[in-house]
Amino acid sequence: MHRDNIMARKLECSGALSDADLDRLDTVIAEPRPVPARQDIIRHGERPENVHLVLDGMACRYKIMPDGRRSIMAVLVPGDICDIHIAILGRMDHGIATLSDCRIVDIPRSTVDELLGEYPRIARALFWATLVDEAVLREWLVNMGKRRSDRQMAHLLCELHLRLEAVGRDGDRFEITQEQLADMLGITPVHAQRAVGTLREAGLIDWTSGRLTILDVGRLREFAEFDDDYLHLRQARRSS
Amino acid sequence: MHRDNIMARKLECSGALSDADLDRLDTVIAEPRPVPARQDIIRHGERPENVHLVLDGMACRYKIMPDGRRSIMAVLVPGDICDIHIAILGRMDHGIATLSDCRIVDIPRSTVDELLGEYPRIARALFWATLVDEAVLREWLVNMGKRRSDRQMAHLLCELHLRLEAVGRDGDRFEITQEQLADMLGITPVHAQRAVGTLREAGLIDWTSGRLTILDVGRLREFAEFDDDYLHLRQARRSS
DNA sequence: CGCGGCTTTGATCCTTGTCAACTACAGTGG
DNA sequence: CCACTGTAGTTGACAAGGATCAAAGCCGCG
C-alpha cells in the first residue's frame, strides 16, 4: 500500500501498524513550513514545543566542538523525525540544521505524547524507527573507525542513495557541499576533496557545476564494501 | 528511592514510571546466568527468543569487518539492556559479547512485547533508555572524528567511569585490555598503547598488573574536554 | 620450566591534516 | 557591461598522527 503520507510510508516498514493507526498518522501531518538551506531547525539545549518531521530536502544532526569545528552525526531524509528526543528526553543534546532547502512539519509535543501513550503500535513503530537510526549511527562509527577516506565517502554515498530511493526520492544526484561531506566523515574539506577526486577518477561519481552525481551505484557499492543489512529496509516481522 | 533492581533503578531516571510500573519490573528479573569473559551473548543475524540484561560485568556491541578486524560500537554496563532490537527489529545487525565476566538475565521476548504493549510508561522508559544509548553513540562518533587518540581515550574512560558510578559500581578501576580499548576507539592496539602511555606519564591513570586505574578523574575530564551532558543522568521531566 | 597472552618499544611507511595559493562561478552594484 | 565580492572547489608542499612490522619484555599458569 502506497500512501502519500511519507511518515506512514516509513513507519509501515516496521510491520507493526494497523489501518486505524495509519489513519491516525494522517491527521498529525500539518501544513509544512519551508526552511531554507543551512538554517537551524533546533539548537543544542532547547526544549521546544514541537517535534519536527522532514517532508522534503535533507537535514542533519550536528555538534560544535569547543574550538568551533562541526561534527555531523546523522543525515535526515524525507520521512525522518528529527527529534523525538524532545518528547522523551526533554532537552536536545545536539542541534539540527537543514543541509538543503527543506519542507518541515511541526508536530506538537502533546500529539507525540498521545501517540506514545494511547497507540501502542504507533509507539512501537516510532521505537522501531529510532532503533534503525541507532543502527545507522553504529555503521557510521564503523565506517569512520575502519575505512579509509575514499571508501568511507563511497559508503556514505551508497547509504544516502539507498535511503533516498527508499522513500521515493532521486538518490542519484544531490545537492551537497564537500565541506558538509567532510563534517559527516570526520575529515577536513581538503581531504574530502581528494576522496571525491579518487571516486571521480574511478568513474564512480561525477561532480560538475557543484552537483554530485552517482554514475555507477553497483561499482560504488563494491568499492565501499557496502552491505545494506543495517538499514533494515525489508519488512520486519508482523507483530502478533 | 533505591531499589536493588538495577534495571528499575536505571529506567527510573527517565522520570516516567509509577510505583506499579516499578513493581512490574521486579517480576521480569529472573535468575541471572554467569557468562565468562570474551564470550558471545548473541551473534550477528540471530533472532533468539530472549532479550538480555547485564546485571554484572561489562559487555559490548561489535561488528567484524570482511578482513577480520573488529569494531566495538558500544559498551554495556550493569542495568543496560543488550538487545531490544530482537523484540522490535527482529534480527540483530551486530553481535554482543562479554568483555569481562558477567551475570546476564534472560527476558523472554513475549515479556518485552507485553511491557511494550500494555505498560505505556515502561515502554516510554525503554524508549528513553534507547535514546540515551543513541546519544552515547553520537558522542563516540564525535570523539572518533574530532579528537586525537590520547584525548579520545581519556574521553572514553571518563564516560565509563561515570556510567559505572551511576549504577553504583566502582568506576575507578576496571578490567580491560588495550586491544579492547583500541577496538572501541577505532585505532590499533599499538597506538592504544601509546595513548595509554601518554595518560600514564601525565599522572592521570595507572596501569599495573594488567589493571587500569583512574588516578585523577578531574584532570582526566579536563584533558578530554569531557561534558557529561549527553549521558542524561539527571532526572528527566516528570511525565504528566 | 616453558608456553601463551598481553604489553612495551623502535623503525618506517602511509594517510590525513595544515597552510597557502589559485580557479571558477554566482550575485551585486556601479 | 564590467569590476567587486564571497563562496566553493582545486591543487601542491609539507607536517604530523596513526598504521604496520618486528622484536623483546612481562607475567600468570600448567
Image (spheres, coloured by chain):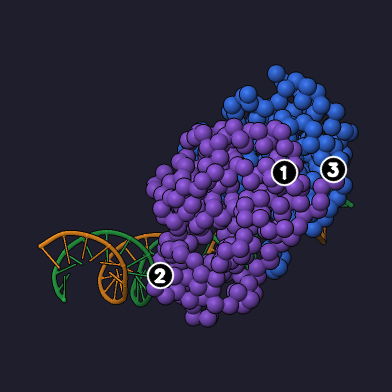
Chain colours: A purple, B blue, C orange, D green
- Based on the displayed image, in which of its 4 quarters is residue C26 positioned? bottom left
Q: Nearer the viewer, mark 2 or mark 3?
A: 2
Question: What number is the disc on residue A219?
Answer: none
Residue B228 shows in the view:
no
A123 lies above or below B12? below
Query: Camera-side residue: A67 or B200?
Result: A67
Question: What number is the disc on residue A210?
Answer: 2
Q: Residue at x 41, y 66 (%)?
A: A190
Label 2 – label 3 distance at C-alpha: 50 Å
Identify the element where label 1 is drawn: helix
In what quadrant of the picture does the N terminus of chain B appear?
top right
Amino acid type of disc 1?
Asp
Q: Residue at x 46, y 45 (%)?
A: A41
Q: Which residue is mark 3?
A: B109
Residue B105: give x, y in percent of width and height: 84, 38
The chain holding disc 1 is A
Label 3 – label 1 distance at C-alpha: 23 Å
The chain holding disc 2 is A
The tag earlier along the polypeptide, 1 or 2, is 1
Circle 3 crowding by C-alpha within 10 Å: few under 14, some 14–19, many from 20: some
Q: Have a look at marks 2 and 3 and say if they share a chain.
A: no
The chain holding disc 3 is B
Q: Residue at x 49, y 66 (%)?
A: A174
Q: Residue at x 52, y 42 (%)?
A: A106
Identify the element where label 2 is drawn: loop
Query: Camera-side residue: C7 or A119?
Result: A119
Label 1 – label 2 distance at C-alpha: 42 Å
Q: Which residue is mark 1?
A: A21
In what quadrant of the picture does the C terminus of chain B appear?
top right
